[in-house]
Amino acid sequence: MRLRWSALCPIFLIAVVFVVFAGLFKDDPRRLYQLAMGQRLLVRVLALGGCLWAVSVFERGDDLRHAWGWLATNTALVLLRDLLLVASLPPSHWLSAALVVASNVALPIGIWLLVRSWKRVAVELPAGRSWAIILGVVLLALVVSGSAVAKNAGDLLDGKDGALIFFVSAVALAMFAQA
């Protein structure tokens, strides 16, 4: 087993633990919600730590440092919104909307800076596989976010409160998962 695959073992173990607990709590919606929020917070904290670690690896002025800084900003904003929800301090509609919009601005900027850096140093996919990989990523983005885009578009057309925020977020996920 290669080292990079062995690094995934803790992730698989954590996933198994969450699946087991989800099975135990399936009849108690409150505890299942707490488990899901705990999992969400754990993932966000790990993602923020990874982004900050990536920022620390690069020197000031490096394009990749800026890119990872924007990605860390995105993660921190989403984590802040989730922490406000967990702390039973539901943020006002405007604060929640501002956090979501700001995070949706930071994410594509970070992704764009990463792509620009990779193009600048001429990082390319192996010959012949680039179209297959791009097609796979597009299909994966549609599978992951297609139903959310459709549902939120329907909610937006029905005039439901807050639907615009979720629609823009789902469309951003679908678009920038392909970048």
Image (cartoon, helix red, strand yellow):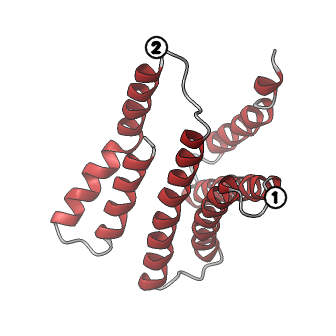
Look at the numbered disc 1 and give the secondary structure of its residue: helix
Q: Quadrant of the C terminus?
A: top left
Amino acid type assigned to the residue bearing label 2 in the image: Gly
Query: Is disc 2 surrounded by few (<14), some (14 to 19) or many (20+) residues within 10 Å?
Result: few
Q: Is residue 108 above or below residue 135?
A: below
- Residue drawn at the location 75% of the way across and 31% of the way down: 8
In the shown orientation, is residue 134 left or right of residue 41?
Answer: left
How far apart are labels 1 and 2 at the CA level? Answer: 35 Å
Nearest the camera: 115 or 122?
Answer: 122
- Residue drawn at the location 51% of the way across and 75% of the way down: 99
In the shown orientation, is residue 171 left or right of residue 25?
Answer: left
How far across and how far down the image is residue 84, in percent?
Answer: 61, 77
In the shown orientation, is residue 85 left or right of residue 1?
Answer: left
Q: Is residue 121 above or below residue 55?
A: above
Query: Is disc 1 surrounded by few (<14), some (14 to 19) or many (20+) residues within 10 Å?
Result: few
Nearest the camera: 175 or 61?
Answer: 61
> Which of the 4 image quadrants contains residue 94?
bottom left
Q: Quadrant of the N terminus?
A: top right
Q: Is residue 98 above or below residue 27?
A: below
Nearest the camera: 48 or 70?
Answer: 70
- Label whose residue precedes the other's in the sequence (1 or 2): 1
In the shown orientation, is residue 6 left or right of residue 69?
Answer: right
Q: Is residue 12 above or below residue 75?
A: above
How far across and how far down the image is residue 172, in percent?
Answer: 39, 55
How far across and how far down the image is residue 124, in percent?
Answer: 55, 28
| Residues at circles 1 and 2 in contact by the CB criterion of under 8 Å | no
Nearest the camera: 92 or 97?
Answer: 97
- Residue drawn at the location 59% of the way across and 83% of the way down: 89
The residue identified by callout 1 is: 56
The residue identified by callout 2 is: 128
Amino acid type assigned to the residue bearing label 1 in the image: Ser
